[in-house]
Image (cartoon, rainbow, N blue to C red):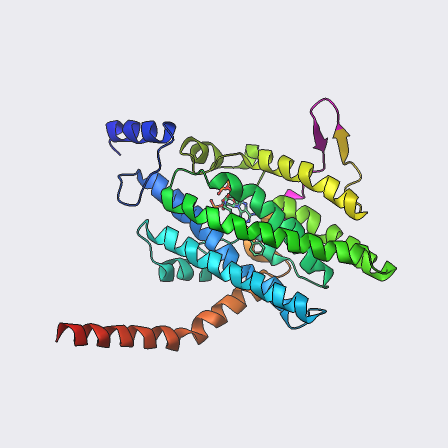
Amino acid sequence: DDPEKLAAFQARIDRGEKIEPKDWMPEGYRKTLIRQIGQHAHSEIVGQLPEGNWVTRAPTLERKAILLAKVQDEAGHGLYLYCAAETLGISRDEMTEMLLDGRMKYSSIFNYPTLTWADMGAVGWLVDGAAIMNQVPLQRTSYGPYARAMVRICKEESFHQRQGFDVMMKMCQGSEAQKRMAQDALNRFWFPSLMMFGPSDKDSKHSAQSMKWRIKMNTNDELRQKFVDQTVPQAEYLGLTVPDPDLTWNEETGHYDFTEPDWAEFMEVLAGNGPCNRDRMEARNRAWDEGAWVREGLMAHATKQRAVSVA
Ligand code: FAQ
């Protein structure tokens, strides 16, 4: 890229201007955004699977309606995000194919199973909680379509987080067995939720450049710390124990000290060897194959309509 153009581009970012689809941008900026927005979109779509697992088994009609609405919101988020990525010159089909053949990732968290109803509480409370922590600052990200998509997505994610906390509250006010289920869900989802923020800053290969371009507004460790600080008092309120014996409030820093997740496990999950990676990819591949006739039908219809309007 031409150094003068690069400098002018960086100056726009530094002034806090939004970059729009038709503006000049460095190839690396475009590629990073496609990677990050695409990964985010795929996460929303794959993220429907662990919760979809409980739609037919929700304990009441009301809980079922709420869960169904949440899962539908996730489909909507995926679609907005694919549209935002499409403004960068890639198609949704291309991104889907890249997900299916392993060239693109989705969030590690969705490779963990949802074993009990309490997991619906833990996913809403912790997974959506972590998602919000990451996404609220992204409302100010430098790429216009991404920033605008985040505004609506964050509103819906807040509702998701509250419904998860509400499920946890009910469980924690319930029988001993229900409390044990809630604690077990927290035990299993705590460290995987901390992994959602990505590797520690010293191992994050993209953070420095992405922050310079304001594609990311914070480092992975900053957001992870904020999440821990926010979530620990919520666990206390629920009467649950965070599964980290070394978790302590640090008067000096004004933050909690906590144990880092097991990064070897994180790398294994990223490499495709988490508990549910194969199931998730199989489900997405099946949906893609079984939906082929719909896509073909729509294309045939569109071609016909075009022919009619030309004639
Ligand atoms: N999982 O250099 P960095 C949701 C990869 S919320 C998988 O630090 P970066 C809502 C990373 O891609 C979840 N891969 O990378 C919901 C890179 O690999 P690459 C989605 C991960 O991009 C709730 C490598 O590691 N949210 O779905 C993960 O600067 C409930 C090096 O890492 C977003 O995507 C991970 N956890 O920072 C839905 C938010 N972490 O591509 C349903 C937007 C890192 O070079 C139910 N994304 N990697 O091969 C971001 O903010 C960033 O992309 C990070 C990673 C922070 C995730």
* Res 249 visible: yes
Among all residues in the image, which is located at the extreme left?
311
**Range shown magenta:** 250-265
Tell me what residue is drawn at x 75 percent, y 51 percent.
187
Tell me what residue is drawn at x 45 percent, y 38 percent.
140
Q: Is residue 268 magenta?
A: no
Among all residues in the image, which is located at the extreme top?
252
Q: Position of residue 204 (x, y in %)?
A: 52, 37
The quadrant of the picture occupied by the C terminus is bottom left
On screen, residue 306 versus residue 83, left or right, reads: left
* Res 270 visible: no
On screen, residue 67 versus residue 248, left or right, reads: left
Please state which of residues 79 and 216 is positioned toward the viewer in this rendering: 79
Please state which of residues 265 and 14 is positioned toward the viewer in this rendering: 14
On screen, residue 104 versus residue 297, left or right, reads: right
Q: Is residue 257 magenta?
A: yes
On screen, residue 79 versus residue 234, left or right, reads: left
Tell me what residue is drawn at x 31 percent, y 42 percent.
20
Dividing the picture into quadrants, the one containing residue 121 is bottom right
Q: Position of residue 274 (x, y in %)?
A: 62, 56
Dividing the picture into quadrants, the one containing residue 21 is top left
Q: Where is 156 relative to 247, above or below?
A: below
The quadrant of the picture occupied by the N terminus is top left
Tell me what residue is drawn at x 76 percent, y 57 percent.
170
Q: Position of residue 229 (x, y in %)?
A: 68, 36
